[in-house]
Image (cartoon, coloured by chain):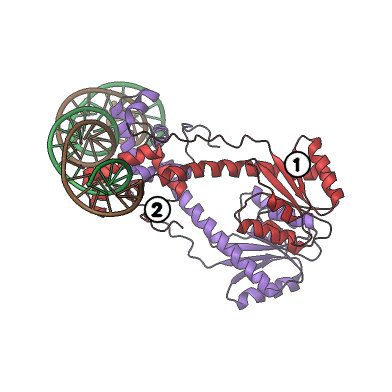
Chain colours: A purple, B red, C brown, D green
DNA sequence: GGGCGGATCATACCGAGGTTTAGGATCGCA
DNA sequence: TGCGATCCTAAACCTCGGTATGATCCGCCC
């Protein structure tokens, strides 16, 4: 009975990895493009940060290679820009004449690596491999989380509230007293929650709540 | 009855923060010592990495300030050394003539900051504040985790096994079938587990299992 | 106005969780 | 040899979780 809406079952990011390169020097773009292609990696090159932003990012593990010295915007500022725009992609910096404070700032902001020109091809490839791997992992996590959020979104406000109390460990009768309901009503909500969230057991639901960051904050502010 | 061994109830790290400084230059030690004391921070200075290792580290949020150029051991190697010895303390590097690869390596290995001499006092103080804060948090986490491990250690092998299955969401009868027991026996174990772990509810226990990294790996290998 | 989803509650029933009491078996250590 | 810890089980009993059936009420949209 009870026909469930069939979970979309993550088709994951099956697309092949992509390396993005932004550099105003055509010869650098050319060289890097050849390097990555030689090891079978897909590459997309751009002459400016602006060009890159026009490009529609694919749903594939990827990374971005940036020169600290970009035409208009500095690489560091662009990094901050991307973070602010909620675009999270691992960044590898290159520089011909960078300094230590720059390096520190970039690394603190989450850069994967910071290579000084001229660098050895192998160092660049190692950095890219690490960056792609990091992106693959964070994409997998984000995927799971977004599916969970989608399920959570199907809950009514009342159900969300009950879910928070259930996963915090209260008994049905305590929840009922807490929010002024009959115990049976709580049971009904609880049943709905389990079905909608696709939880096969209470521990299952608890783990979902953990991932969703659900405290007993009812459902108003989600810091 | 069952007299429980009274949980040690974290007396937390109430001790005041400490800043450790390692530098072979006495004037640098002196200057930093004065700087930190001027803002009311406790400071301990050392002329070498070896001296530092002799010192018994207090149970207080702290950080370490290192020159990349140390007498015998390089600062980077010493950082690796500490990590290998499982001594985790936030590190702030100083350098007069460091380069970018060094900086990258230090930051990748988890350094909090990397300051070039001469630096502004305020930059150093900011870095130390951030480092102390980071250490405070990781100490709090470690404290909770170690108390949890202590409780978990009081479980018998069988109880550990049952706990893994319970928190994975199986019903008592399924657990019983899984490991060849009567359902009633599983219930008994389950009761013991809840008491010994101090869990007030199943969700509580599930969260503990999460922190302990307990999968359905029975209890053999704890990677 | 009728339909629909959300929320509420009652009664009844059943399976799962959990404790107590009481016992039996094995093993290691003093 | 005896004690204690671990592990296992049974019967009785109670609470809690969960579902089904059926029903009322409200607000919203077509």
**Residue B39 visible:** yes
Residue at 57% from the left image edge and 40% from the top image edge: B140
From the viewer's side, name the closer residue of B113 and B71.
Answer: B71
Q: How many marks?
A: 2
Q: Which residue is mark 1?
A: B43
Query: Residue A80: x and y, percent?
Result: 69, 50
Query: Residue furthest toward the bottom?
Result: A38
- How far apart are labels 1 and 2 at the CA level? 43 Å
Where residue B5 appears, as percent x and y from the top left, is 42, 36
Circle on res. A67: none
Local secondary structure at mark 1? strand
- Percent from the top left, x then y, of residue A136? 53, 61
Viewer-proximal residue among B97 and B59 = B59
Q: Tell me residue A181's x, y (percent).
A: 34, 24
Q: Chain of mark 2?
A: B
Please tell me which of labels 1 and 2 falls first in the chain: 1
Q: Quadrant of the N terminus of chain B?
A: top left
């Amino acid at each position: 009975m009870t026909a469930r809406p069939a979970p979309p079952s993550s088709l994951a990011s099956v697309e092949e990895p992509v390396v993005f390169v932004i550099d105003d020097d055509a010869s650098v773009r050319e060289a890097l493009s050849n390097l990555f292609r030689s090891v079978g990696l897909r590459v997309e090159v751009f002459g400016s940060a602006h060009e890159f932003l026009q490009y529609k990012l694919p749903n594939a593990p990827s990374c971005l290679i940036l020169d600290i010295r970009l035409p208009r915007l500095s690489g560091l500022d662009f990094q901050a820009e991307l973070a602010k725009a909620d675009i999270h992609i691992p960044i590898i910096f290159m520089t011909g004449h960078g300094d230590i404070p720059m390096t520190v700032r970039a690394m603190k902001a989450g850069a994967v690596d910071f290579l000084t020109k001229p660098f050895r091809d192998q160092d660049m490839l190692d950095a890219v491999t690490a960056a792609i791997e990091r992106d693959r992992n964070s994409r997998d996590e984000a995927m799971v989380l977004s599916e969970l959020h989608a399920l959570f979104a199907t809950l009514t406000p009342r159900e969300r509230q009950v879910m928070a109390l259930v996963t915090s460990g209260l008994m049905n009768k305590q929840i009922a007293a807490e929010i002024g309901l009959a115990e049976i009503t709580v049971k009904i909500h609880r049943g709905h929650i389990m079905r909608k969230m696709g939880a096969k057991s209470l521990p299952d639901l608890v783990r979902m709540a953990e991932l969703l960051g659900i405290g007993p904050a009812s459902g108003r502010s989600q810091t």
